[in-house]
Each structure stands twice: as C-alpha cells, then as structure tokens.
Amino acid sequence: MKPAVNRRRGEVGAMIDGKAMTLCLTLGALAELEDAFASEDLSRLAARFSAGRLSAHDLVRILGAGLRGAGEPVSDAEVAAMRIEDGAAGAAKIAAELLSAAFGEAVPEPTSRP
C-alpha cells in the first residue's frame, strides 16, 4: 500500500523495494535536476520533461532527486538497483506524477528508452 502523501506539498507515494515510500521534488531537488540535465532554469527543465521521452538514466535521476527531496539518503546508484512496482513503466509513472506535482501542470507520462 502506498504511503499517505500531501499533494499540496508535491509529495507522491510509491512502492519501491516492497516498501511504501514518499518522493518530493523540493526546490533543492529541482536544483539538483537543473544541474544534472544542464538546464539554465526551471522553464527549460519543464520543457525538457514535457517532451515525454526519458531514458532509464533520466528516470533514475528524477526518482533519486524525489527520494532525496523527501529525506531519503540514497545515491543514484542505489536508486538504479531498486525494484519499482511495475518495473520501467512504474518508474515512468512515478516520474510523471512527480513532475506534474512539482510543475503544477499536466506533464505527459514519459516513455522510457532502451
């Protein structure tokens, strides 16, 4: 069962490694993503994500930032080894929910690339 989350704070719940976890793209997490994706500002970061095409590496970065934003002390390498409910499709869905919660608009569900 997913954890109770506060959507007004941008929180998203997910089952990861068999545990209910909370993810949140705080300002710090968004700044981390700006650096990771070499975006000059939030509007460019949002535009990049709105294309809906993300690699598995992109998903790891987004989920890692979301977990860290919610207080989980995890590295991207640890996130890459985690088991996400529904696999890559589940990871893409969580990323879409996170991005939508953070940017306050509908962001298309990303499709993972091989």
Image (cartoon, grey):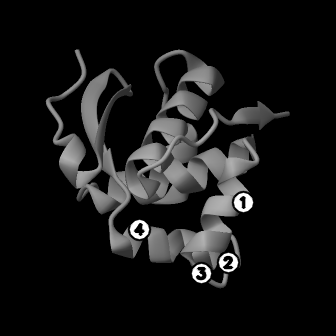
- Give residue 84's position: percent from left, percent from top: 48, 26
**Residue at numbered disc 1:** 48
Residues at circles 2 and 1 in contact by the CB criterion of under 8 Å:
yes
**Residue at numbered disc 3:** 41
Circle 2: residue type: Ser
Residues at circles 3 and 4 in contact by the CB criterion of under 8 Å:
no
Of badges 1 and 4, nearer the viewer stands: 1
**Residue at numbered disc 4:** 29
Q: Nearer the viewer, residue 19 or 98?
A: 98
Q: Is residue 62 visible?
A: yes
Residue, far right: 114
Q: Is residue 18 above or below residue 14?
A: above
In primary-sequence order, the first of circles 1 and 4 is 4
In primary-sequence order, the first of circles 3 and 4 is 4
Circle 4: residue type: Ala
- Give residue 21's position: percent from left, percent from top: 27, 36
Q: Number of callouts in the render?
A: 4
Instruction: Using a 10 Å C-alpha cutoff, classify the residue at mark 2 as few (fewer than 14 neighbours), some (14 to 19) or many (20 or more).
Output: some
**Which of the numbered marks, if any, corresponds to residue 39?**
2
In primary-sequence order, the first of circles 2 and 1 is 2
